Image (tube, rainbow, N blue to C red):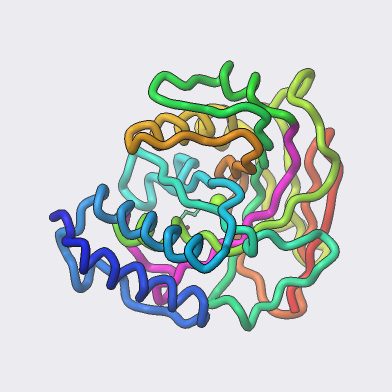
Amino acid sequence: MSLSKDSIAKLAEHLENAELNAHDVTKVTDDYPNLDIASAYDVQWEIRRRKIKRGVRVIGMKMGLTSRSKMEQMGVDTPIYGFLADYFESPESAAIEVDRLIHPKVEAELAFFTKAPLRGPGCHVGAVLAATDFVLPAVEIIDSRYRDFKFDLPSVIADNASSSRFVTGGQARAVDGLDLRNLGVVLEKNGEVVATGAGAAVLGHPAVSIAMLANMLGERGEEIPAGSLLLSGAITAAVSVDKGDNVSLRAQGLGSFSTRFI
Ligand code: 0L1
Ligand code: MG
């Protein structure tokens, strides 16, 4: 079912308020059971428009559901995308306030910084690598606005793919000479290893995910501008965090960094 303009605006306001006020809501398909994927993206793009209208900058995009395990869990075979607003970025040195979130989880990702636009259809790994200025390890903090992190595909797309916060750190490197497929990461919480992974967990190669993002955006007549920050999708499983937790990410050849939750 495609949604009317009024319903799109209503759902966007509902979901954005849940994000801004850090309260959970029931999934949007409870009220709109036949919500289709295109309309779910319309709601996400409307949330983005609301933020831009208030002066928020969109600094990049993210891919989600890029691992086989997450796709199988959701019963889907296509990843999803979301946008990254400027205030989602948390500097390495700053602490993340848990009270401003609902039920955050962390996952290790790779951030691509672009120096040229990327456009689909037909975008491929080679184009992504050529357009990449440098990469950095990243911790994405996802925070579904849905009660108990329970949702279906249209609901999570409308909710901006659970985007909430992210931190980049470590050592910026050009992609030349990096083996992104075999790039190993170790995620620690309070000094204990909680997840490990390799770049191949993201659709076989993290740059495949970015090419797919450009192609998905191309279907809407949109492109990825130069100067974007793009999160690849998770290399590790997502791990819950709470006040007092300290999370560190170590990435092979790309250094390490930590972030605190207060
Ligand atoms: O970044 C992600 O892979 C999250 C996508 C949305 C699904 C979730 O919240 O787990
Ligand atoms: Mg993610």
Q: Residue 212: where, in percent of width, then height?
A: 45, 31
Q: Which residues are magenta?
A: 134-153
Residue lying at the far top in this picture: please name it.
126
Residue 152 belongs to magenta span: yes
Q: Is residue 188 left or right of residue 103?
A: right
Residue 56 drawn above or below residue 17:
above
Give the quadrant of the N terminus: bottom left
Residue 211 drawn above or below residue 191:
above
Residue 116 belongs to magenta span: no
Closer to the camera in the image, 45 or 173: 45
Query: What residue lies at 63% left-to-right and 59% top-to-bottom?
Result: 86
Picture quarter containing residue 35? bottom left
- Is residue 212 in view? yes
Query: What residue lies at 38% left-to-right and 23% top-to-bottom?
Result: 121
- Is residue 198 in view? no
Picture quarter containing residue 148? bottom left
Give the quadrant of the C terminus: bottom right
Closer to the camera in the image, 118 or 65: 118
Closer to the camera in the image, 48 or 155: 48
